[in-house]
Amino acid sequence: MQSSNSALSWWRKFISDPVRTFGAVSVVLLALLAIAPAKNYFSEWRHYQNGYLRLIRNRGDAVTLQRHVQPGIQQIWHPELGVTDRCTSCHVGLKEASLADVSTQPYRKHPVIPHAIDQFGCVMCHRGQGAATTVEEAHSSTLAWEQPLLPARYIQSGCGQCHQKPLDSTPVLNQGRATLARYGCVQCHTVKSPDGTIIKATQDAPALSHVADKTTREWVYAWLKDPQAYAVSTTMPNFQLKDEEARDISAFLMANSTPVVGDTAPETAHKAADPAAGGSLYGEAFCSSCHAVQNAAGNLVGGNVGPELTHIGNKVKPDWLRAWVRNPRVYDAATEMPHYRFNDQQLEVMEGFLLAKKDADLLANVHLDTATPDQIAHGKSLVTEYGCSSCHEISGIKRPENFAPELTRIGSKPVSQLVFLERMPHTLPDYIAAKIRQPRAFGSGLKMPQYTLSLAQIDSLTTALLAQNERAQTLPPALMAPNAPASHYQPAGKAGQLMTDLACFSCHAINGRGGDMAPDLTWEGSSVQRQWLEEFFKNPNTLRPALIRRMPKFNLTNDEITTLTDYIMTVYQTPAFDRDSLPATGYSPTEVEQGKQLFYSKYACQSCHIVDAKVDKGYIGPTLTAVGSRMTGAWVYHWLKDPQLLRPGTVEPNRHMGDEDAKALTAFLMMQKGSVKSQGAKK
Amino acid sequence: MAKTLEQYFDELRGTRVWRSVFRSGTGSSPLHRSLVIQQNVFFHLFATKVRRRMMSFSATWYLGTLTLGTFVILVITGILLMLYYHPSAPQAYADTKDLQFVVSSGLFLRSLHRWSAHAMVFLVFAHMFKVFYRGAYRPPREFNWVIGVVLLLMTLLLSYTGYLLPWDQLAYWAITVGSNIASAAPFVGDKIRFMLLGGNLVNANALLRFYVLHCMILPLVAMFFIAIHFWRIRKDGGLYSLQSQPKVAAAATPLTPAKEAQ
């Protein structure tokens, strides 16, 4: 009471003297006003710039470094891109190559990238708030800024905004985009490139209209319940179906299936197949170039073009399998599987070998009663509800349009529009990654299935999706680096039919269409000698001993070989030079000797190639011991002059050879006709 | 003998230049003091004589003066902010951010403007309540009360138009809501809204319109009414107190004001 009274009286006295009051208020005001310029002076960026000056003061190249420093706020400004980046105000030494040893931020030098540091600014790739001049505002997510710095593992999404074509330096982005297409994400979600093309799935799920010919209802049930239990590498996701749901869907699929004429071949007689013979036939046919099998150690061995075959015996009906291996195109005209010309004995061996690949426990506990019409009808509604026909062709059910949300601009979706899980960082990359990792965690009513993806795959998918953003869609056209348009090349005539039948495009690319497992054949006619090609079709031997995958032997007839060879030699010619402009033989010994010198000394070709199998150890490029009986002289000559011109992207370096050198080397190489023994073996 | 400081000042006041600017010369008679007040446009806003009691804090809590003070701060900081701001849709938000990031003491400037604006609205209301509860609106001050109400309206409109200028989400939706409220007026509601926004949506037109209103039209109108407001204080007999009430007006009202507590 006393104190409050005295305080009151003090206050009365204080305000009763206007001069004193005015003076006191003025002093307080001045002090408050001084805070503003003081805060301005002690700003973060100035602190960091002073720190940088202290850092470089005692270095050997201090004078050079100091000359590069410009005091004050720095900015990279590209109004046409919407870039105003002031990051360089604190990150002073970004461009200083000599700061390679500095590891403290913000002074570290920027790693070498294909673009100049200030060509596009920082935010294009790193995100964050470029205009900000404080660490918190620039790096973090704040009330007035939703995009914090992008974690380094997603950084390649920046490249993907302009570059739609796969780049050597963006493996994560490439993997993400490949996964997006391969795992069927784009079957349900529409994803468009900035040029407007819709990204297409690279792997078509099998049609289910005739599934009853191929497999049993029990297998379909087990598969639906857990696809990865049958094949660990399958891209089919787990829909986490209840038992009744799997029962009803399998009932519907079986009831809905119609038979295909000729796709089952009744067995004439069962002979116990020799497992060793099966294994060697499987090996000779190079099935493993496309199909993987899990070995005893649990590792997958083989390619991923065709389905995994570890437990194939659990799945297929024997009659169907035999018909399929005999000619897969009867059951599925568009399959990537080649039509091997196996004879009946080989078919039997192969069938026995494949059917033995089974896991006795897989279907042991599956017991299904005969389906009722109600179950079948329910199965049909479930198939529609889960969007099965987005990926699988199912007769009687239309492929749904826009089944899932479009993801063309997912990489710039405002965080305020996202619903996060509890205890989850509120950033867009975290949201996308979590959504891929466990889609159903975001709500029990969601239809997106559970994928089996590694962390690296999830990161790469997230990277690819982050590249799908507003900026990518609105780039100035000059900056767009679009993908090559999809090629629908189809060779004509009888040879064309044969090439479809043999599924050449599953491995080889021609005129922009086809796989990348085997060499591009667009200019094969200019490249090889006719005789060699014919021999090769009869008995494909390897050109690259270091590679496991090889061209399989298709058991072609002589007529078929002639048709193919004629077509290749006539049509697949480069316009760059005449195939017959240089002879295959008859070079002068002086030239050959000169070429040999160049090969071994000046150009040191033996580091990658083998000419003399006894001496040379180069395994990177193809073996050249018989190159003279394989390639045309003109091809060798022009290849030496400029390899990238003939095959863009080849690892063969361009040595900028003069005409003289190239000619001499051609002479030397064309004299490498292979040993008499191997020539004899070929014939 | 050295001159005193006062003598120096007197000498200065006597010079021709001084006299050309300030017409009252030296002297300290009551007449001279009155003339000093009367002949200066700024001093003349006030009554020639003010009771000492009315200058104390408790009489008015200085609410009117404080309101004027915030208005002056708002004009000064507002003009400075205009130097850094483009009223265009792509630029406005970036400019607001740049005030924070690169303009020297820009954040201080902007904060000062914003907080002064909030303070001014608060002070205007407080001022009105004080006037109301003290009965200072009564004759002959009714018209000045009306002017005051107009100034309240100006203050609110200035506050509302300024709210859009940062061009952020808060601004956008506040103005969307506000203009929708305007459109609820009977018969002419939609026309008012269209006129306010320069269109049917809050977009670049609305931003430009609000900028012109906020920086030009409304401040000029407010200054005009502030001038009248001050003029009327003087003409209505200075700051209100019981004793200052003119006899005629006091006779005209049958009500006897409550006796002030000392």
Image (cartoon, coloured by chain):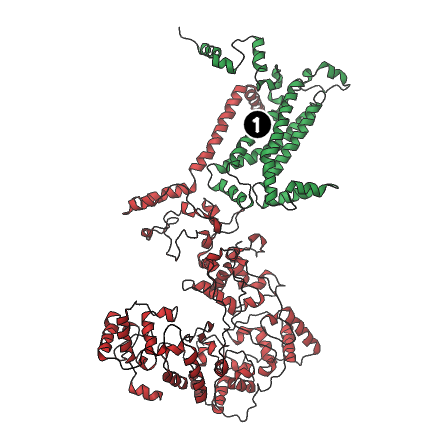
Disc 1 residue type (three-letter): Gly
Quadrant location of the C terminus of chain B in the rendered image = top right
Say whether residue A620 is visible: no
Chain of the residue that carries numbered disc 1 in the rendered image? B
Q: Is residue A242 above or below residue B206?
A: below
Q: Is residue A213 above or below residue A431?
A: below
Q: Is residue A274 above or below residue B35?
A: below
**What secondary structure is found at the residue carrying circle 1?**
helix
The residue identified by callout 1 is B69
Neighbour tally class for label 1: few under 14, some 14-19, many 20 plus, Cα within 10 Å: some
Q: Colour of chain A?
A: red
Q: Position of residue A84 (x, y in %)?
A: 46, 47
Seen from this angle, which residue lies furthest right?
A: B254
Q: Position of residue A308 (x, y in %)?
A: 49, 77
Quadrant location of the N terminus of chain B in the rendered image = top left
Q: Colour of chain B?
A: green
Q: How many marks?
A: 1
Q: Position of residue B176 (x, y in %)?
A: 64, 44
Say whether residue A593 is visible: yes
